[in-house]
Each structure stands twice: as structure tokens, then as C-alpha cells.
Amino acid sequence: MNLWKYYAITHRDHVVCNPMSTAKLDELMERLRLPSGARVLEIASGKGEFLIRLAERYDIVGIGVDQSPYCVADARARLRSRVPKARLTFVEMDGAAYRPDEPADFHLAACIGAGWIFGGHQGTLRALERLAAPGGWVVAGEPYWRQEPAAEYLAAIGEARTAFGTHHENATAGRDLGLELAYTLVSSPDDWDRYEGRQWYAAEAWAREQPDDPDVAEVLQRVRAEKAAYLQWGRETLGWAIYLFRKAEGEG
Ligand SMILES: C[S@@+](CC[C@H](N)C(=O)[O-])C[C@H]1O[C@@H](n2cnc3c(N)ncnc32)[C@H](O)[C@@H]1O
């Protein structure tokens, strides 16, 4: 089935499509202290919640890039209803192909929960570092191994051990790029449970509401397999954090 449709079904109840609480996200936004007119880019902007919350707090000029037509439509609807006068644009395209008008021009460049677009955490930081202005922020949200993953878990989720680092590896991955870690937000097991549980709940509810949809069996099979893997291994094995880095001044 269409990947974006699956994602839209499982995430229809999510405000933020990653395992961070909105309270912690708000704390991060507070720390950013963006100047008026700050230029902000988010690759994989999902439903636009990060940019829209930023626009509710700061006078920013923002662009969100996401490949899912469902997410982009949702983000544009939220923009119209929450901050219609904000200078935000949501673009539907592959984030890997996004090229800015000006290089190294953003006060904040973010990619939260889609590191695969750039081949993992290190590649994401490299790409965001090039997009951020000297002295600007780089924000990356990424899973991390809380413990060595069981081979059965890796097989169940279709990932390699090398797909993610430890929290320490993620937090220090910016060093060689001139990115200084300024702050981390780490999801609690409760945050993760809510993120995962909302997906199971949404998929089961959707299947009851749309019994004739041709994708019902596949959606349920997939979400139940993900639920089983999370409960058996993922909950103890995989963590989630958002890493806030400051790009060095004077580099561009
Ligand atoms: C885990 S969600 C995170 C969304 C958002 N950053 C948030 O935290 O709410 C991953 C997002 O990546 C988007 N995505 C996946 N592959 C992409 C690509 N190649 N280019 C742009 N967006 C992509 C999905 O549509 C989805 O919105």
C-alpha cells in the first residue's frame, strides 16, 4: 500500500509525529530565542507543528519540506487556522532534493525524525550544518540504542545495528562538523508509549470505520507487528532524543 497513506492512518491522532512530549518541545522552543525575522527550515516537517508553534512564539520566516501529500495538506490547514498571517510555506518534495535560494542562510535548520533522508544522523547533521548560518541552530531528532539490540528485534523492524548510534554517539556526532551540543531533550518511556500507542489505537479505529477499504488487512497486519516488536524489544531497546547544536560563528 501507499506509504504516505499508511503513515496518515497511523498518525492521524498525533499532533507531533515523533515520540517527544509537546511540553518538552515547548521548552526547546523557549531556549532557541530566535530574533525577529529569523529564517527557519524544517526538512520532514510532518503536520507542521514545530514550525507553527515557533511562528506562534516568534516572528519567523519558515519553510517546511515534506514528501507526504497528507502531511503537507494537514500542515497548510493548521497554518490557515492557527497563524494565517505567519510567513510560513509548506512544500511537498523529497527533503534530500531541497536546495535553498542562499547557502548557509538559516537561523535554524531542523530535521526531526527522518534521518534516513540523509543516510542517518551524521549525514543529517552534515546537511543541516551546510544549511545553517554561522552561529545558527541545528536541530536533529533521532533514535538511539539504549542497549544492544537483539538480532530478532533488528529483523522485526528491518534495521541494521548501524542504523542508529548510542545517545553519546548522537550527541557528539557534530564535533567534527563544528557543531557544539547545546541541549538535549530525551523522551521518557511514557512519551514513547503514547507515540506508539496512538498509532495502534488510530489504526484499529480507522479499520472499524473503513471496513471496505482495500488496505485494511495490510494496515492491521503491519501495525500489529510493529506493536508486538515494540512491546517485546523496542520499549527497552530504542530511545529517542532531540539534539540541539550551535554552528560555530564565522563559518559558512
Ligand atoms: C517521524 S515523522 C516526523 C515529522 C515531523 N518532523 C514531526 O516531528 O512531527 C517523519 C516525516 O518524514 C516525512 N518524510 C519521509 N521521507 C521523506 C523525504 N524523503 N523527504 C521529505 N519528507 C519525508 C514523512 O512524510 C513524515 O512527515
Image (spheres, rainbow, N blue to C red):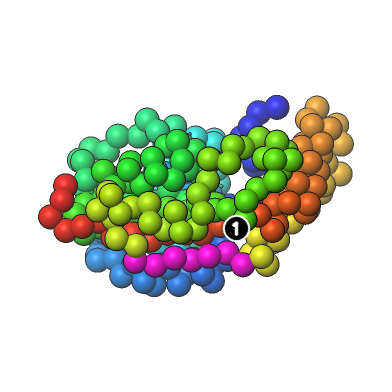
Near-viewer residue (133 or 16): 133
* x and y, in percent, of residue 178 in the image: 24, 53
Query: Where 31 sits versus 208, above or below?
Result: below
Mark 1, residues whose alpha carbon is within 10 Å: few (<14), some, or many (≥20)?
some
- Is residue 183 part of the magenta span, yes or no? yes
Query: Where 57 sits versus 176, above or below?
Result: below
In terms of secondary structure, where does tag 1 sit? loop
249 on left or right of 14: left
* x and y, in percent, of residue 67 in the image: 49, 35
148 on left or right of 186: right
Residue at the image point whose x is 57% and y is 64% from the top: 187
Q: Magenta residues?
A: 182-188
Residue at the image point whose x is 27% and y is 49% from the top: 177
| Outermost left residue | 250
- The residue type indicated by label 1 comes to Arg
- Is residue 21 part of the magenta span, yes or no? no
Residue at the image point whose x is 81% and y is 39% from the top: 220
Q: Which residue is mark 1?
A: 146
22 on left or right of 180: right
Image quadrant where one finds the N terminus: top right
